[in-house]
Image (tube, rainbow, N blue to C red):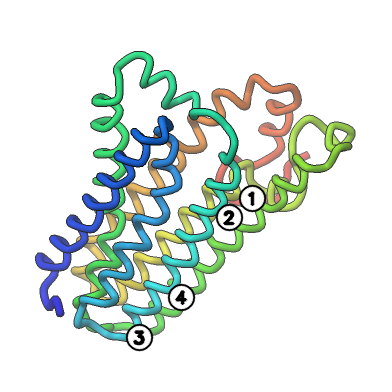
Amino acid sequence: MTDSIPAMLAVGLAIVTAVMVATAISARVAGRVSVVDVAWGLGFVAVALAAALLGDGDETRRWMLALLVTAWGGRLAWHIHRRSRGKGEDPRYAEMLGESGFGTVVRKVFVVQGAAMWFISLPVMAAAVSEVRSWPLVWVGAVLWLVGLVFETVGDAQLAAYRRDPDHAKKGPVMDRGLWAWTRHPNYFGDACVWWGGWLIGGLATGWLPGLLTVAAPVTMTYFLVFATGARLLERTMMKRDGYPAYAARTSMFFPLPPRR
């Protein structure tokens, strides 16, 4: 059993390193860097399960986090695998491979994603070796986590149904119904809720100091989802599509709000 935060952080680093090395080897064999997107969710699952098994903190909270992370990470990995099955390389990675080669991709993609995975998992790892100071915060965090998971799951399902509908063009060039009428990126918003919920459960519920020391994890995730690799980056491409600027004018980009006229 692991009874200190430094030891648990070392365990988490070892798990993340093993996952990303295995993923890089798989990507090299398959000839597709995009397998790293499937490994993203599974890496968090591996860290959470290791933390639950090896930590000596509150057992209920350890396994609650393991269950929540497994539900989120497993769903995300399956969704990405199903969406990309039978398709070629992701254009982002293809361009990177063409310009720099696989060695640079390892540094810019696998190392960076591994470091982000470890850093964002800080509340989960901290919770594994700590006792709970506030159970109400744990339950609030669990509710927020589930809200995020619902937004991701329902948003992805609604978009998939829209794309499968042979008459979807008659309904407009842009999916703007359901959750997509309230936010242009329900999956990204849901992802942010998930990790803020995880911080409430594993960070702030442990005490104000652990909460302060781990709050950078959800802040970093939210920054990436909104500004770095998520919504803002996708918007640059989507704004070129017919009907999207009008959709953007009446629909909140991130936080769900009633549609504007």
Q: Position of residue 14 (x, y in %)?
A: 18, 56
Q: Which of the two labelled residues, at mark 4 and mark 1, occupies the earlier sequence position? A: 4
Residue at image position (23%, 58%) is 15
According to the image, label 3 marks what residue?
60
> Element under label 2?
helix
According to the image, label 2 marks what residue?
152
Disc 2 marks which amino acid? Glu
> Element under label 4?
helix
> Element under label 1?
helix
According to the image, label 4 marks what residue?
140
Q: CA distance from mark 3 to mark 4?
A: 15 Å
Q: Nearer the viewer, mark 2 or mark 4?
A: 2
As drawn, is 256 to the left or to the right of 61? right
Disc 4 marks which amino acid? Val
As drawn, is 119 to the left or to the right of 4? right
Q: Work out which quarter of the rendered image holds the C terminus and state it.
A: top right
**In the rendered view, would you say 191 is above or below 28?**
below
**Viewer-closest of 12 and 179:** 12
The answer to whether mark 2 and mark 3 are in CB contact below 8 A is no
Q: Which of the two labelled residues, at mark 3 and mark 1, occupies the earlier sequence position? A: 3
Q: Which of the two labelled residues, at mark 2 and mark 4, occupies the earlier sequence position? A: 4
